[in-house]
Image (cartoon, rainbow, N blue to C red):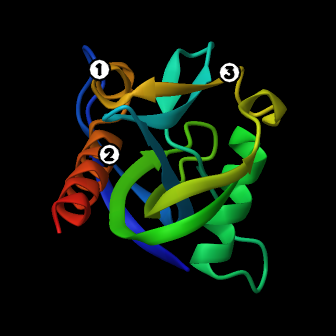
Amino acid sequence: MKTPWHLSTSFRNEATVEKTRDVEYLISSGGVVHFTESDETQVVLCHRKTPDTWCLPKGTPNSGESLEETAVREVLEETGLSVIIDSPLGYIQYSFANRHDKRLFKKTVHFFLMSPVGGNIEDHDFEFDDVFWLPVSKAIALMTYPNEVSVVEKAITQLESSSAS
C-alpha cells in the first residue's frame, strides 16, 4: 500500500526543503531463540561485519505464508536452527528511507519466543557473516537496534514468569 507522506528534510548548510515521498508498508516476522542450561539463558544473534550489525533473525513472508510460518522459516534460513514457537512476543515498528528513489518504508516486525529442536548455527545462510549463541546480558550489550533489545527483554520476562509458575 502506498500513500503520500510529506517530509521536511534539512541538509547541512542548506535550507529546509519540502518533499513528498511514497510510503510503503512492510511486514516481517522473526524470533528470539532461547536455550537455558545451568541457570544461564542464551539467545541467538545474527552478525553482519559490514556494517557491523547484531540483530535478531527475521524476514519477509512468502506469498500465502502466515507470520508464524515466516518466523520459523526465516530463523531456519538465517540461523541454521529448526525451531518451534513457544509464544508471541508482539511487534516493533520503525521507518527507513531509500536514498536512491526517495521512498519511505514503514515496517512492522512480529516476533515470537522460540525453542530450538534441531539444526546447527554453522548452517546459517549467506545473509549474515556469523550466528552466535550468547548469554542474554552479552547479547543485549551487542545488539544494534534498541527496539530489538526490548523484544529480548520481553522474552526473558516471559521465560522468568513461566519458570516461576
Relative vertical location of residue 120 with respect to residue 47 in this rendering, above or below: below
Residue 113 place in picture, x, y as percent? 43, 60
Mark on residue 130? 3
* SS class, disc 3: strand
Q: Which residue is mark 2?
A: 152
Residue 105 place in picture, x, y as percent? 49, 57
Measuring 54% from the left and 56% from the top, which residue is drawn there?
115
In the image, 107: left or right of 5? right
Q: Point out the tag, 3 or 2, that comes first from the N-terminus.
A: 3
How far apart in space, not on screen, are marks 1 and 2 (Cα)?
Answer: 11 Å
Q: Which residue is mark 1?
A: 141
In the image, 94: left or right of 97? left
* SS class, disc 1: helix
* SS class, disc 2: helix
Residue 24 place in picture, x, y as percent? 53, 67
Label 1: few (<14), some (14–19) or many (≥20) C-alpha neighbours in 10 Å: few
Identity of the amino acid at label 2? Answer: Val
Identity of the amino acid at label 3? Answer: Asp
Relative vertical location of residue 47 with respect to residue 13 in this rendering, above or below: below
